Image (tube, grey):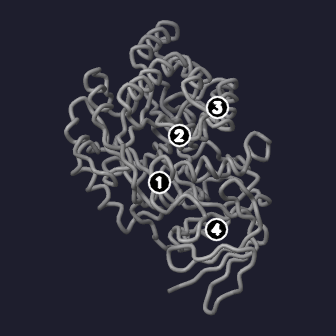
Amino acid sequence: MRRLLITNAHLINEGEIRDADVLIQGERIEKIADSIRVPDNADVIEAAGRYLMPGMIDDQVHFREPGLTEKGDIGSESAAAVAGGVTSFMDMPNVSPQTTTREALAAKYQAANGRARANYAFYLGATNRNIEEIRALRVGEACGIKVFMGASTGDMLVDDSHALELIFAGAPIIIVTHCEHSPTIRDNEARAKAEFGADVPMSEHPKIRSATACLASSSLAVDLARRHGARLHVLHLTTALEMGLFSRTSRHEKNITAEACVHHLWFDESRYGDLGTRIKCNPAIKTAKDREALIAAVNDGRIDIIATDHAPHTAVEKKRSYFKAPAGLPLVQHALQILIDLAKGGQIGLDTIVDRTSHAVADIFGIVDRGYVREGYFADLVLIDTDKPYTVEASNLLYKCHWSPFEGHTFSSSIDTTIVNGTVVFRDGELTGDVAGQRLEFNRGR
């Protein structure tokens, strides 16, 4: 069985940073110590003081397969993910056909087998009419149940109050929600059209997809979860108003958890002027004060998880006018670099980054033997060089859509090495060619 030794690393794990060596045997971590003698026939990675941490587990991506593969697919987007230090992903159901049956769910797992460079899991999508499919789910069959409680891409809006009651009462596993209030959005769209005609400027997006629209929907989700005792995870929060819904209590003591995404922690509405539809997403990027409130909530525990909501569209689609340009942007290749730069700016701690991108995801979703650097756990690791700047260019993008809102931007750090299940899949700026992703296992139900 192959062995790999990582020496002289600054290990960030479980709330501390320390110098350590990590020995991997096969797919799992065999030993962690201050110093480990090089075993016979072991490969060695000399970390030379670079930061070693568990790979990011991204609980919200749209890899677009099946049916929308002109935008991205499991192979292309998982390649970009491992280049960004993302070692596991959970993919959303708004594809074609939509993943709203257990049969469609099984087909996605089959499609990922042998093609995903990172570990993978898939959500079952909720509709107004598939409560029996939801009730039939078993732990491990899906990573969660996705409920679109507001207008988004596709037609998966769950807007029937009786259906929502049934979903929250009968869900056997965690529910994750996209929360925006569609009637409020439609009223705001009508107002914008009356004022601007067909040529609505991008600066109106956070007013159309307003804080009020977000709060109305997220408040409903929290109320449903409390009344039915359901486990709820509210995705991609964007407003200061919503932070009052969530507790600073340890995630181990609460059933309702919250997420923020890297683009909402990085951008604010001032960037619509130069980036336009390239940062159009739902929910919308909002004010600088909202961004600051999200960062504060990450730091005090109200925000439990940081994700990407990676959502590629073609460059041609994104050049369309406001109402015709789709919402979403590609992010998995640069998410950790965004967070490292926030850390260097004093906005978030390195240990908090690791907790919110790895530890918390494993705990909240019940992922088996991942999310921590522990002996016996799977070796899903990323080595980051915080002293090597990295400039995003078209030539180094691995997304199938082949664009990024960060093109021309220089991050202060680089992803040096990514390891998935003990296999080096990315090193020194290049994919190694190994496809090592495995299906994630889960052990937590309702």
Q: Amino acid at mark 4?
A: Thr
Note whether residue 318 is visible: no
Q: Position of residue 275 (x, y in %)?
A: 62, 33
Q: For numbered disc 3, what is the local secondary structure? A: helix
Check the picture and name the quadrant holding the C terminus: top left
Q: For numbered disc 2, what is the local secondary structure? A: helix
Q: Amino acid at mark 3?
A: Leu
What's the residue at 55%, 65% (across, down)? 380
Residue 239 placement, left or right of 208: right
What's the residue at 64%, 31% (across, down)? 294
Camera-side mark, 3 or 2: 2
Q: Could you say which is closer to the camera, residue 336 or residue 166?
A: 166
Residue 203 placement, left or right of 186: right
Residue identifier under label 2 = 253
Label 3 to label 1, Cα distance in Å?
23 Å
Dot 4 or dot 2: first in sequence order is 2
What's the residue at 63%, 77% (across, down)? 23
Q: Amino acid at mark 2?
A: Glu
Dot 3 or dot 2: first in sequence order is 2
Please say if 424 is above or below 172. Answer: below
Residue identifier under label 1 = 89
Instruction: Answer whether labels 4 and 2 touch (C-beta < 8 Å).
Output: no
Residue identifier under label 4 = 417
Dot 3 or dot 1: first in sequence order is 1
Q: For numbered disc 4, what is the local secondary structure? A: strand
Please say if 210 is above or below 359. Answer: above
Dot 2 or dot 1: first in sequence order is 1
Q: Position of residue 147 (x, y in %)?
A: 36, 34
